[in-house]
Amino acid sequence: MRKIALTGAIIVSSAVFSASPLSINWSTTQKSFTFSQDKAAAAVGKPLSAGSVAGVHRRQERRQHHQSTTAPK
């Protein structure tokens, strides 16, 4: 029973740590662990970023146009 509880605790804690933007750092000068919360800065919503739908579409159009104009005739 103890092994099942330990396995469950490991699974739950790994899910919490992977879903939250937390960092665990080891400080060599203080010989201790520090926890810090990271900030996410996503750039997907910007229209000129490569990850947005509009940016991907523009890049595909440029490549297609470039390939059609440089193809040997």
Image: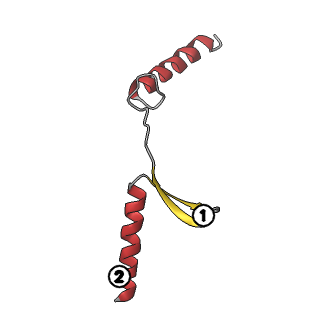
Mark 2 or 1, closer to the camera = 1
Q: Are the two marked residues, 2 and 1, in contact with CB atoms closer than 8 angstroms?
A: no
Question: Split into 4 quadrants, where in the image is the N terminus?
Answer: bottom left
* Label 1 packing within 10 angstroms: few (<14), some (14-19), many (20+): few
Is 43 situated above or below 25? above
Residue 8: x %, y % from top left: 36, 76
Identity of the residue drawn at 39% across and 80% down: 6
Which circle marks residue 5 in the picture? 2
Residue 19: x %, y % from top left: 38, 56
Question: For the residue marked with disc 1, what is the amino acid?
Answer: Gln
Residue 73: x %, y % from top left: 63, 10
Q: Splitting the image into 4 quarters, where does residue 57 fall?
A: top left
Callout 1: helix, strand or loop? loop
Question: For the residue marked with disc 2, what is the amino acid?
Answer: Ala
Callout 2: helix, strand or loop? helix
Residue that extends furthest to the bottom in the rendered view of this protein: 1
Residue 36: x %, y % from top left: 46, 54
Identity of the residue drawn at 48% across and 28% down: 50
Identify which residue, 53 or 5, lies in the foreground. 5
| Mark pair 2, 1: CA separation | 33 Å
Of pointers 2 and 1, the one earlier in the residue sequence: 2
How many circles with numbers are drawn on the protein?
2
Is 10 situated above or below 5? above
Residue, disc 1: 30
Q: Splitting the image into 4 quarters, where does residue 29 fall?
A: bottom right
Identity of the residue drawn at 41% across and 26% down: 46
Which circle marks residue 21 in the picture? none
Identify which residue, 71 or 39, lies in the foreground. 39
* Label 2 packing within 10 angstroms: few (<14), some (14-19), many (20+): few
Identity of the residue drawn at 62% across and 15% down: 71
